[in-house]
Structures are given as C-alpha cells and as structure tokens.
Amino acid sequence: MNPNIGKLLIFIGLALVAVGAIVYLFGGKLHWLGRLPGDIRIEGKNGGGFYFPIVTCIVVSILLNLIIVLIRKFFG
C-alpha cells in the first residue's frame, strides 16, 4: 500500500478533529451559519417543511477552497 495514503488519512482525521473542536467551542457564536439570506426554507401548515441552505453551502465551499489553496501554497 502507498504510504502517502496513510499520511492523507492522518491529515483528514486531524482536520475533522479541528473542525469538531471549533464547532464545540464556538457553536453558540455560529448560529447564523445555515440561516443566511438566500437559503431556501419552505414550511408547511402541518409542521412539515423543506430546507436547503444553498448560500451557506456556497460560503462554506469558498472558505474550504481558500484554506486548501493556502495549504498548497505553504506546504506544496
């Protein structure tokens, strides 16, 4: 097996731990995440509904891309 796969799995695990710690520590301050203008929310009369956070997905995608670009720039 390729040893680079092991390094990649370790990096992914550390990244998940870091994201989990951020959500755990700052979860109360991130209440706006998922409720941005442009997120689609349709609520039914009987309590049912549909929610699609399209703008939140775009913002998270842009942030992750910036992080990946910075990591590649400094370590690649």
Image (cartoon, rainbow, N blue to C red):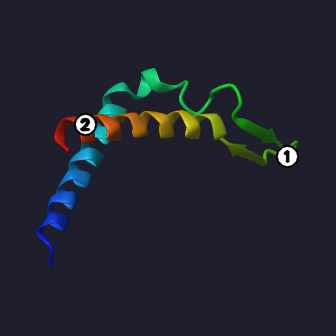
Q: Where is residue 58 in the image (x, y as percent from the top left)?
A: 57, 38
Q: Residue shown at 58%/35% (left/top)?
A: 56
Q: Which quadrant would residue 25 be assigned to in this image? A: top left
Total of numbered circles in the picture? 2
| Label 2 residue SS | helix
**Quarter of the image with the C terminus in it:** top left
User: Tag 2: Cα neighbours inside 10 Å, few (<14), some, or many (≥20)?
Assistant: few
Q: Nearer the viewer, mark 2 or mark 1?
A: 2
- Lateral position of residue 69 relative to residue 6, left or right: right
User: Tag 1: Cα neighbours inside 10 Å, few (<14), some, or many (≥20)?
Assistant: few
Residue at the far right in the pictured view: 45
**Quarter of the image with the N terminus in it:** bottom left
Name the residue type under label 2: Lys
Q: Residue shown at 16%/64% (left/top)?
A: 4
User: Would you place residue 37 above or below residue 66 in this image?
Assistant: above
Q: How far apart are marks 2 and 1 (CA)?
A: 51 Å
Q: Where is residue 10 in the image (x, y as percent from the top left)?
A: 17, 56
Q: Residue shown at 39%/34% (left/top)?
A: 66
Residue at the far left in the pictured view: 3
Q: Where is residue 52 in the image (x, y as percent from the top left)?
A: 68, 44
User: Would you place residue 13 above or below residue 23 in this image?
Assistant: below
Residue identified by numbered label 2: 73
Q: Position of residue 28 (x, y in %)?
A: 43, 24
Nearer to me, 11 or 32:
11
Q: Residue shown at 44%/21% (left/top)?
A: 29
Counting residues from the start of the chain, the first of labels 2 and 1 encountered is: 1
Name the residue type under label 1: Asn
Residue identified by numbered label 1: 46
